[in-house]
Image (tube, rainbow, N blue to C red):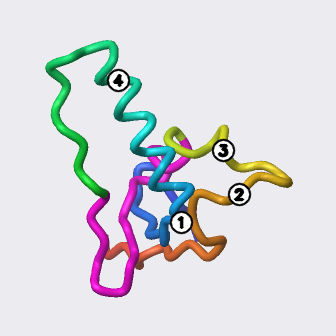
Amino acid sequence: MKFNINDDVKVKLTETGREILRKQHDDLRGLWPTFPDYEEPKEDKDGWTTYQMWCLMEAFGQHIAMGLTMPFETTIEIPEVVK
């Protein structure tokens, strides 16, 4: 199977992940006061949030290591891409 990092994946965020996203937003808002208000990530009815793989890596990469609290559950859903 080939997978492009521009393709979507789905994860279930933990509270740690939500806190990381809020902090990233607040940091940007500190630099640009006109930055838009924070919006909670959109979850589907089962609690999955969709990201392009590269966006997921960019947002959470530095927060994933042995001994750290995970920003999302360890199961990732890779939706089937019809091309």
The numbered mark, 3 or 2, whose residue comes first in the sequence reads: 3
Q: Which residue is mark 3?
A: 63
Give the Cα distance between marks 3 and 2. Answer: 8 Å
> Callout 1: few (<14), some (14-19), or many (20+) C-alpha neighbours within 10 Å?
some
Q: Which residue is mark 1?
A: 14
Residue, disc 2: 69
Reading the chain from its start, which is encountered first: label 4 or label 2? 4
In the shown orientation, is residue 65 left or right of residue 24? right
**In the displayed structure, would residue 78 be above or below residue 17?**
below
Residue shown at the point (66%, 44%) measured from the top left: 63
Q: What is the CA distance from the residue labelled 2 to the residue labelled 1?
A: 9 Å
- Tell me, yes or no, whether the two marked residues, 2 and 1, touch with CB atoms within 8 Å: yes
State the quadrant of the C terminus. bottom left
Task: Report if residue 50 lies within the magenta region.
Answer: yes
State the image coordinates of residue 6 (x, y, percent, origin top left): 41, 50
Query: Does residue 14 lie above or below 44 as drawn?
Result: above
Residue type, mark 3 in image: His
At mark 4, the secondary structure is helix
